[in-house]
Image (cartoon, grey):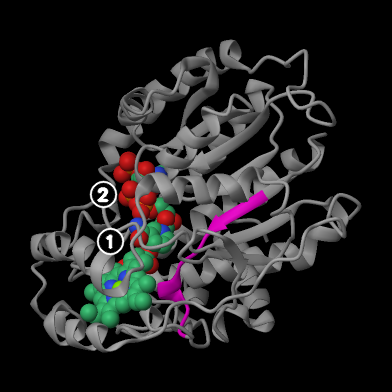
């Protein structure tokens, strides 16, 4: 729509890093066969009784809190022009890693109020303090993406707060590469796809209504993707590769009872489930763009922020992996990026006036310049995107 830009500067298109000899050596060292040696030290991420109890306590606390922390309208726009008030951005999973670094980067501009959608309220509060975010720049609201009830409760709490919604960042994720057996969300979906894709799918569909109402000049809905879901890259070709197949497992509800726990109907594989969930994230962004960009003017985007090898995402991996992965990415693939740098990248997608194009998968080159990247064939398949959308709608109770 009108806000999207013929005014934008042209962006340069580069390709993602390609293979080299040292990468081949490393493959032999710790790559492809590594998963055969993984220990099954998986612990469930969702402790239901505890979460439910916490959720009730927190939901009450949140109502009280959100009524007092609604951000003030700033009287003078610092750089003149259109921005009359602070932007409000919801970031899911802002209690660590990329989400926290992005929250910090945005909060310290003084132009954003960050709503941190987190499953562990105290962890989020400590995290915000630890990076020096000041109280008036953020609100924490409880959100457990592994429970659709919690997602609905979060949306309800947010709407009761009276804050307008200008940008939504779907960032939270779990990665369970060592799990021998699947675990499940509250509704019985395999946990990785249930959390990373279905929880965010419901959240973004519900919050679209709120975003439509916002008068903010540049509204954006961002879903974090990844290189490892894109099989047109070296990283995306490390087994197990993402593949959604004909969606038979997703259509069956991923519950392991009357259907497979994997989208393509295959045997459970935690690493593949994560990569599949990232493909769903990137397809969802494009389907949003096709369905809603013209009508709403919202810019829909996804991104690969770089390999942030130090984050909590790898917490379930074996200790040897966690030790070797950062130096491997730093010195061999050279794909490493610090949490701080990655946070600045995602903050750019939230607020940079030159990144308003919709339907784009952003990446960065070695000089940290952003470019529009190409998605793999599967991650850009419009027919698959439509099917994932329609099946997901049924699973989360929207159709
Ligand atoms: P982290 O583990 O540091 O952050 C993930 C966040 O998601 C945490 O805040 C976590 O909460 C939250 N989360 C997990 N499960 C739930 C849930 N059920 N409900 C609500 N929140 C939840 O990992 P990263 O920062 O690395 O990951 C952030 C995003 O970046 C992900 O989408 C990931 O796919 C993507 N990404 C990461 C890359 C990397 O190299 N690290 C590369 C490419 C993409 P808690 O703190 O409570 O655990
Ligand atoms: Mg990968 C340019 C090469 C490159 C990049 C950018 C990544 C990113 N990786 C690359 C190459 C390789 N990786 C090679 C050659 C190997 C074999 C040694 C390799 C292995 C590897 C493993 C075992 N890489 C991994 C894992 C994981 O468990 C991570 C994963 O797949 O998480 C889903 C991972 C990653 N590599 C990346 C990135 C960004 C990840 C992590 C996270 C993600 O996609 O969100």
Left or right: 167 with respect to 154? Answer: right
Mark 1 C-beta to ligand 1 under 8 Å? no
Image quarter of residue 233: bottom left
Magenta segment: 221-231
Q: Quadrant of the N terminus?
A: bottom right
Relative image position of residue 5 (x, y in whole percent)? 84, 56
Relative image position of residue 114 (x, y in whole percent)? 55, 30
Does the magenta run of residues contain 223?
yes
Residues at circles 2 and 1 in contact by the CB criterion of under 8 Å: yes
| Above or below, comparing residue 107 to residue 305 in the picture | above
| Secondary structure beneath label 1 | loop
Q: CA distance from mark 2 to mark 1?
A: 9 Å
Residue that label 1 marks: 183
Residue that label 2 marks: 45
Which of the two residues, 103 or 383, is positioned nearer the viewer here?
A: 103
Q: Quadrant of the C terminus?
A: bottom right
Left or right: 151 with respect to 235? Answer: right
Q: Is residue 242 visible?
A: yes
Residue at coordinates 27% horizontally, 67% vertically from top-left? 329
Relative image position of residue 185 (x, y in whole percent)? 37, 54
Q: Which mark is residue 367?
A: none
Which of the two residues, 79 or 106, is positioned nearer the viewer here?
A: 79
* Residue placed furthest toward the front: 367
Image quarter of residue 335: bottom left
Residue at coordinates 42% horizontally, 62% vertically from top-left? 306
Image quadrant, ligand 2: bottom left
| Above or below, comparing residue 399 to residue 280 in the picture | above
Residue at coordinates 77% horizontally, 51% vertically from top-left? 298
Left or right: 280 with respect to 30? Answer: right
Which of the two residues, 16 or 248, is positioned nearer the viewer here?
A: 16
Does the magenta run of residues contain 394?
no
| Secondary structure beneath label 2 | loop
């Amino acid at each position: 729509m009108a806000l999207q830009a013929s005014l934008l500067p042209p962006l340069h298109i580069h390709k993602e890093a390609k293979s080299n000899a040292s990468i081949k050596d490393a493959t032999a060292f710790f790559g492809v066969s590594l998963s055969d040696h993984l220990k099954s030290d998986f612990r469930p991420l969702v402790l239901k009784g505890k979460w439910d109890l916490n959720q009730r306590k927190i939901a009450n606390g949140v109502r009280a809190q959100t009524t007092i922390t609604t951000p003030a309208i700033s009287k003078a726009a610092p750089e003149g022009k259109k921005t009359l008030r602070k932007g409000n951005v919801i970031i899911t999973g802002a209690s660590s890693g990329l989400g926290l670094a992005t929250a910090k980067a945005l909060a310290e501009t003084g132009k954003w109020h960050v709503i941190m959608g987190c499953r562990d309220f105290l962890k989020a509060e400590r995290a915000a303090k630890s990076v020096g975010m000041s109280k008036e720049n953020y609100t924490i609201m409880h959100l457990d993406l592994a429970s659709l009830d919690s997602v609905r409760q979060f949306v309800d709490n947010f709407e009761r707060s009276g804050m307008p919604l200008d940008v939504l960042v779907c960032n939270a994720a779990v990665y369970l590469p060592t799990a021998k057996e699947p675990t499940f969300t509250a509704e019985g979906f395999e946990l990785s796809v249930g959390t990373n894709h279905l929880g965010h799918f419901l959240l973004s569909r519900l919050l679209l209504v709120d975003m439509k109402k916002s008068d903010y000049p540049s509204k954006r809905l961002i879903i974090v993707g990844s290189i490892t879901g894109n099989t047109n890259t070296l990283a995306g070709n490390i087994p197990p590769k993402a593949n959604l197949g004909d969606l038979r497992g997703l259509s069956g509800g991923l519950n392991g009872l009357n259907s497979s726990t994997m989208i393509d109907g295959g045997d459970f594989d935690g690493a593949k489930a994560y990569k599949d969930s990232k493909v769903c994230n990137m397809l969802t962004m494009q389907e949003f763009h096709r369905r809603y960009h013209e009508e709403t003017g919202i810019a829909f985007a996804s991104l690969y922020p770089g390999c942030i090898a130090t984050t909590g995402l790898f917490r379930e991996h074996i200790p040897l992996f966690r030790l070797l992965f950062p130096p491997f990415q730093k010195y061999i693939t050279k794909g490493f990026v610090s949490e701080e740098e990655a946070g600045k990248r995602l903050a750019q997608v939230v607020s940079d006036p030159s990144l308003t194009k919709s339907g784009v998968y952003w990446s960065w080159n070695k000089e940290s310049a952003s470019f529009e990247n190409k998605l793999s064939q599967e991650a850009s398949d419009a027919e698959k995107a439509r099917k994932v959308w329609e099946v997901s709608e049924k699973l989360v109770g929207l159709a």
